[in-house]
């Protein structure tokens, strides 16, 4: 049996080619992800501790920041030779052209004591005193800054000049985030970032100092609320933080890899089912000459193991190439990629085992079915052309599971539970899998009807061929449902989310321009500087603060009508010394129009009771209703330190957009930590992440679709072999070569089109449930169908299926008719 199995593998190598390709692609995705994870982990270890090369211990503020006085106390501890406060925040650089340097800028406090300095200086030196700054070398070169010349740096306040004393190399470190790096002494870093203290204190100790005793003295000096870590603990935590990010990225990739593997499993199972059905006579003859069912079963399992082993080895090699390519791309970003790509034995072993287990596992059920045919019955032609239908129990279970999935998706919108969306999608898919032998052929007949009307009898033959084995076409089409269902769910969900975001901006941002903080709140004084410009009519900084259980918001009289509706009183009465009280709060406190209410230490008159259309409705599960709106000036008087992340700006009456924008830009030249956008650009910024995620997800799930289309080609190729004599008879009675190609093309199109349509329906249903759930939770989300993109997905699947039919058609036409008629 062993020799026969190996000879069968050699003889039927071409039959295994496409199914082997499915395994290769699935394993390549897994292996490439694991190899890339190894490279990222190596890179994370290389980065960890870059700025702690001379740090022997660290004091960390667990609940609060550490004050400069705490740094002085730690520095005075016996055994400490140097102690410096460190913080990492954000700032901004004004370029040589007077405009802010683009990119998120990291600002860090650089130690002044040589015993703690771990920066790699490229030119000049590190700052030693207030008023000095270092920048990363690429920014200095790009902007043309000169050493010992002033560079304007800003943060929570307007930019002011600092002397550039040096450049540093922070590439491939945790402080390389794509934008400028700014290094200052501790006092300047505190002032620019607005932080009240340091995140940690770096400590260098005298050689020979007892570590355990020193830790105790440092803890006592730092006081309660501080934690002390040894050098090893600092390095371990740095590694853990870096590796955690790499691990999360890997888990995301492995999720998509799992989808590809599942699709490959469908293709392999279908392949073995077809091949074993075509070998029914051979299997029966083996049984006649004494082979037991167990031997036949084990021979099939051995065959699948060999196929899986070869395909997995090829998949690992392809995965290594994919990982090298991705590493080269990611090395241009801030991702922690190691210096080289290595094939770890554990990664190779896991990938190969997974591929072998996938192949063997997918072959078990077909192998078991292949041993069920009685030897004598299998010697007839009817047995060779097996079209075993799905049992009633399977179909009934499939219908119930499919209905349960649809019910869960509908219920998700009513209950507002995300878990029901996920559960509904999974149940609906499994319902399609179980009910597929009845559902897919029926849809194939429906899709084939216009083709029969258009093409004629040739299309009729194709439809009959496609549906003659319901389990086969169901398995082939179902593989497409997974990939296209997920792709369409993300496409519909992304467009619906973008539409909801844009509608929200239209409702809440009714001005021409917005100014947003980069990495934090707007700087102090910015709103006042903008208000002082005569070209600007409306300047409103969105701010809020919670006091006594009430959310107090800053509002502008010219803008409140966008989202607020008066239920009592008039919005026009809103101004200094008055407030707008939201209906739920007014009802809870018994306040009415004209009442005097106290907020902070000041008293205000209620100008109107309002409803907020931009907030979730009460009872939706979100906090709503307990709010008060007051003018910007009144808010500043009560909460002078409170900053917002966004300012809304409109031109003054009679001022055109160009003049207004110029006025805004002239003010923002001194504030490098903010960004100016019009409403369209603001929408694009908010939706840009959605587009990026959609592109990444589509690319990753595209492999699953490719594997499923490989399955279509595989099924068609094996079916052509199975129908060799039948196709020869058709050609003998007058079917032309062109008509034969058309017949096989229509058959491939039916399999792909039905799978794609079911996938589009499943993905759209899941997205519809998700949008309905989000809308119920208070967002302004509705289902948006991007008909063009969904049509493109369907068209790509159909075109790919047409291409997949080319080789099977060549094979069907390659043999002479007489020779094919003699085929057994």
Image: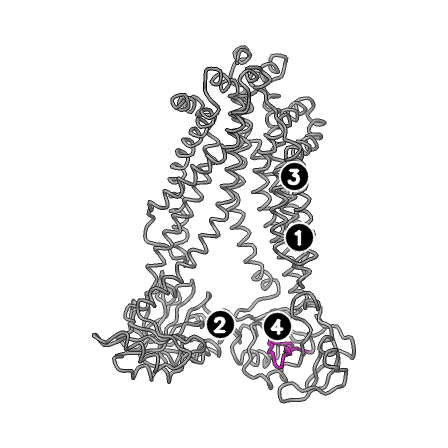
Give the magenta part as a residue range: 536-556
Comparing marks 3 and 2, which lies closer to the viewer? 3
What secondary structure predominates along the stretch shown in magenta? strand
In the rendered image, which residue does mark 3 sit on? 397
The span from disc 3 to disc 2 (Cα, nearest Å) is 60 Å
In the rendered image, which residue does mark 4 sit on? 648
Residue at 61% across, 28% down:
747
Please tell me whether mark 4 sits on a helix, a strand or a loop: strand
Q: Which of pointers 1 and 3 lies earlier in the amino acid sequence?
A: 3
The span from disc 1 to disc 4 (Cα, nearest Å) is 34 Å
In the image: residue 777, left or right of residue 95: right
The span from disc 1 to disc 3 (Cα, nearest Å) is 23 Å
Q: Position of residue 724 (x, y in %)?
A: 55, 18
In the rendered image, which residue does mark 2 sit on? 673
Q: Position of residue 453 (x, y in %)?
A: 72, 27
Q: Residue 124 falls in which quadrant of the image?
A: bottom left
Mark 3 residue crowding within 10 angstroms, few (<14) / some (14–19) / many (20+)? some
Nearest to the observer: residue 283 or residue 544: 283
Q: Which of pointers 4 and 2 lies earlier in the amino acid sequence?
A: 4
């Amino acid at each position: 049996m062993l020799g026969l199995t190996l000879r069968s593998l050699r003889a039927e190598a071409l039959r295994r080619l496409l199914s082997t390709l499915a395994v290769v692609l699935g394993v390549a995705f897994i292996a490439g992800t694991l190899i890339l994870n190894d490279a990222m982990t190596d890179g994370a270890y290389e980065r960890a501790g870059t700025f702690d090369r001379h740090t022997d211990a660290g004091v960390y503020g667990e609940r609060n920041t550490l004050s400069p006085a705490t740094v002085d106390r730690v520095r005075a501890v016996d055994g400490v030779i140097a102690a410096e406060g460190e913080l990492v925040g954000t700032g901004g650089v004004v370029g040589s052209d007077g405009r802010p340097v683009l990119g998120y800028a990291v600002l860090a406090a650089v130690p002044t004591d040589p015993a703690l300095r771990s920066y790699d200086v490229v030119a000049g030196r590190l700052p030693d005193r207030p008023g000095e700054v270092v920048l990363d070398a690429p920014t200095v070169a790009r902007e043309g800054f000169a050493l010992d010349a002033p560079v304007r740096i800003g943060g929570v306040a307007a930019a002011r000049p600092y002397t550039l004393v040096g450049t540093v190399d922070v590439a491939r470190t945790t402080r390389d985030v794509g934008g400028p790096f700014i290094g200052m002494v501790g006092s300047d870093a505190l002032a620019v970032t607005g932080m009240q203290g340091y995140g940690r204190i770096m400590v260098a100790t005298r050689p020979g100092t007892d570590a355990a005793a020193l830790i105790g003295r440092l803890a006592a000096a730092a006081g309660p609320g501080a934690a002390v870590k040894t050098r090893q603990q600092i390095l371990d935590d740095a590694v853990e933080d870096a590796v955690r990010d790499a691990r999360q990225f890997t888990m995301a990739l492995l999720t998509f890899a799992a989808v590809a593997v599942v699709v490959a499993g469908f293709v392999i199972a279908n392949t073995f089912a077809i091949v074993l059905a075509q070998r029914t006579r051979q299997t029966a003859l083996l049984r006649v000459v004494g082979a037991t069912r167990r031997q036949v079963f084990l021979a099939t399992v051995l065959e699948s193991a060999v196929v899986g082993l070869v395909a997995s080895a090829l998949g690992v090699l392809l995965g290594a190439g994919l990982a090298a390519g991705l590493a080269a791309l990611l090395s241009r970003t801030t991702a922690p990629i190691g210096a080289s790509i290595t094939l770890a034995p554990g990664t190779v072993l896991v990938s190969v085992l997974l591929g072998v287990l996938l192949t063997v596992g997918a072959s078990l059920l077909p192998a078991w079915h292949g041993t069920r045919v009685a030897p004598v019955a299998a010697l007839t032609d009817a047995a060779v052309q097996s079209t075993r239908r799905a049992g009633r129990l399977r179909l009934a279970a499939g219908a119930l599971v499919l209905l349960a999935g649809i019910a869960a998706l509908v219920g998700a919108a009513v209950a507002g539970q995300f878990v029901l969306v996920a559960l509904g999608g999974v149940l609906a898919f499994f319902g399609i899998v179980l009910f597929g032998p009845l559902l897919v052929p029926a849809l194939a007949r429906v899709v084939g009807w216009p083709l029969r009307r258009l093409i004629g009898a040739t299309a009729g033959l194709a439809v009959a061929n496609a549906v003659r084995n319901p389990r086969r076409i169901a398995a082939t089409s179902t593989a497409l449902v997974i990939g296209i269902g997920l792709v369409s769910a993300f496409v519909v969900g992304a467009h619906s989310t973008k539409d909801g975001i844009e509608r929200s901006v239209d409702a809440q941002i009714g001005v021409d321009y917005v100014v947003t903080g980069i990495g934090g709140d707007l700087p102090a004084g910015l709103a006042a500087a903008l208000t002082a410009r005569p070209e600007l009519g409306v300047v409103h900084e969105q701010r809020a603060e919670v006091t006594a259980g009430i959310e107090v918001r800053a509002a502008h009289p010219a803008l409140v009508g966008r989202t607020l509706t008066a239920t009592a009183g008039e919005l026009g009465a809103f101004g200094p010394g008055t407030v707008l009280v939201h209906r739920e709060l007014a009802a809870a406190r018994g306040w009415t129009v004209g009442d005097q209410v106290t907020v902070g230490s000041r008293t205000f008159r209620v100008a109107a009771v309002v409803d907020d259309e931009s907030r979730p409705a009460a009872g939706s599960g979100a906090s709503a209703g307990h709010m008060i709106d007051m003018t910007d000036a009144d808010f500043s008087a009560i909460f002078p330190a409170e900053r917002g992340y966004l300012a809304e700006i409109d031109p003054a009456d009679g001022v055109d957009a160009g003049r207004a924008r110029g006025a805004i830009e002239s003010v923002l030249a001194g504030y490098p930590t903010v960004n100016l956008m019009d409403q369209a650009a603001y929408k694009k910024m908010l939706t840009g992440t959605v587009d990026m995620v959609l592109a990444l997800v589509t690319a990753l799930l595209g492999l699953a679709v490719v594997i499923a289309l490989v399955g279509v080609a595989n099924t068609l190729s094996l079916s052509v072999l199975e129908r060799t004599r039948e196709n020869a008879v058709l050609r003998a009675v007058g079917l032309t070569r062109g008509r034969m190609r058309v017949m096989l093309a229509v058959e491939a199109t039916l399999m792909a089109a039905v799978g794609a349509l079911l996938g589009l329906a499943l993905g759209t249903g899941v997205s519809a449930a998700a949008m309905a759930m989000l809308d119920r939770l208070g967002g302004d989300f509705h289902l948006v169908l991007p008909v063009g993109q969904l049509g493109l997905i369907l068209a790509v699947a159909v075109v790919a299926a047409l291409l997949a039919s080319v080789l099977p058609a060549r094979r069907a036409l390659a043999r002479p008719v007489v020779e094919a008629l003699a085929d057994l």
